[in-house]
Image (cartoon, rainbow, N blue to C red):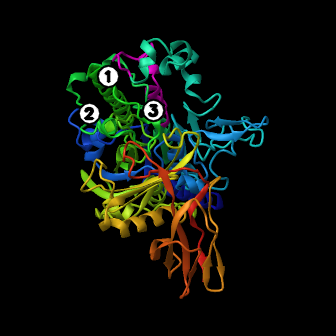
Amino acid sequence: MKIERLLGIVLVICSFTQAQEKSRPNVVFIISDQHKLEATGAYGSRLAITPHIDALAQSGVLFTNCYTPAPVCAPARAALITGMYPYANGAIYHKAPVTMPNGKVKNIGSGYLRETGYHEGIVTLGEVFKEQGYITGAPGKMHVHGELQRDVDEDHKAGNTMGFDEVSVRYYTYFPRGHYEDEVGKDTYMRYRQFQKYSTVYKGGAMHLNQEYVPTLVEDEEDNFDMVVAGKSIEFINKRAEDGKSFFLHVGFEKPHAPFTTTQTYLDRYNPKAFELPKTYDDWYNKGKYPWVPNWVHSGIPNNLDKAQNVMAAYHACITEMDDMVGRVIKTLKDRNLYENTIIIYTTDHGEHLFEHGLRGKHNMYEDAVNVPFIISYPKLFKQNSVNNSIVSFVDIMPTLADLIDGKTPETAQGISLVGTLKNGTELKDRPVFSEFRGADYTLLPKIKNVPSRMMRQGDYKFIYTHGIIDQLYNLKDDPDELNNLIFSKDHQDLYQHMRFQTLADWRFQEYAPMKVSLDRNTLVWETSSDFADYAVFYSATGQVKDATILADEIVDTFYPLSKKGSYWLMARPKLSKTSKFYGDAIPVAVDRYSHILPVSDVIKL
């Protein structure tokens, strides 16, 4: 009897566990690379062929204002995985500068050193799922500084899986035994990216943008990266269909990132002559290069319009290839009866200009680079075919998914759960979000590497700070092409000051330090500096940055008396002296002497 009773208890526990597994939603998170928001049927494109992403939008919620935490791959992806902005998680670089034993600085890609990655002790998205007993998989591109294969870093021989049980087909990340090259062989890998002997197959390396409109050099179509990733994703889903385990699957596609090459099948689905240059394509040609955009991003339009049309069509063909792989993954979920209990997300790490503003790529804060597609589908819980204009960020993904699986959101996470918004259809319009970038090759700062910039979006407005270069402020509702910089508008000075302070107040990172300020009795005191034109004092009774208001502006003294208890900050206006063709000789747009001091102080409490 005792044995029978014991067996009965075991059966009850097993039945409860199985029922719990089936009731918990699975999650398939699909992320592509460099997908321009407007190059999607669901977002209004009349040319983009994206039936599977469009169908996902029809079954779910489409966000129109989702912002990447960085307009470049590695920092954006680390922010997603950690739920933190780059400055906070420490993974701020696309390639991290490391001082070598000979004293020279070398830029190191992801997958080589743990010390160049996100800070240790941060709980990752994969680990959030692992804590809840999920099986986790991550085929394809991850590109997160901090992820390590075993026996790569001498100081971290065990490696760092970031909470993923199954990993394969890594790309842009040094990952021996688990790289794309390991799946398809070196020659196919080189063909895919036109590395080494394949880099000059076409005129002047024109395959990068595919100005010739020719197919990929990969001989077997199924060896193209996204096809391999889709195959690995399907294998993972089939395993879970067999074992019944709840799962989190991170699917890392690479297209439509350059080179804009795909199979002839996808090229044939587009007519390059159908594409037109965007209306802002000649903006910097007419005005001069943008002071706040690196020179090389002004890569410009091919002199031959036919070539430009080929580039645009090839880019879209790459999107359609990737969309087909999205379709393969979703079809497998349906075929294995997992679809109804699976949350599916589609997004991308950053955008692509594709000649908007006469630019190519990303690496700045224009909407084409930072505002990305974001779709979440779970008909069991969320309204279908819904459009949401909330202002959201990648840092919201971790809290949202943790909420949906009844998991624990790490204390380090900086975002918010969007579950209430998704369920109720409410919109978060005044919530501030940020994006940041470190670049080089600015016309007026020619010798400075890793120049930091940061963007704040709140309501209809976007503010952009670029260290050492003139600020930007745009009303995206009235000026969606970001052509009218409102820092010169008298009617917008209060807003300008507010957003500038909010952008800078808590932003701290390697190599850059805040201004030094001290408290002498009841007076703020600071040293004079030739780097700054004047100062402003901000005050918050609650101690919260979001509640701070300006007390005084255009201060030229080096002290300011305080009259009430609370928190204070000093903010400076850099002394700009260099001019550019863009604004003419009348308006200075950059500093003459570059400094690593941020124009804001730490908080002073009275």
Q: Kindly identify which residue carries mark 1.
A: 303
Which of the two discs, 1 and 3, labels the residue nearer the N terminus?
3
Q: Secondary structure at mark 2?
A: loop
Q: Kindly identify which residue carries mark 3.
A: 254
Residue type at numbered disc 2: Ala
Residue type at numbered disc 3: Glu
Asked if residue 349 lies in the magenta stretch, the reply is: no
The Cα–Cα distance between marks 2 and 3, rounded to whole angstroms, is 17 Å
Find residue 171 and report its image quarter: top right
- Say whether residue 248 is left or right of residue 485: right
In the image, residue 489 sits, relative to residue 526, either above or below, namely: above
Q: Kindly identify which residue carries mark 2.
A: 48
Neighbour tally class for label 1: few under 14, some 14-19, many 20 plus, Cα within 10 Å: few
Asked if residue 214 lies in the magenta stretch, the reply is: yes
Q: Nearer the viewer, mark 2 or mark 1?
A: 1
Is the N terminus in the top left, top right, bottom left or bottom right quadrant? bottom right
Mark number displayed over residue 168: none
Residue type at numbered disc 1: Asn
Q: Nearer the viewer, residue 235 or 500?
A: 500
Q: Residue at x 48, y 55 (%)?
A: 395
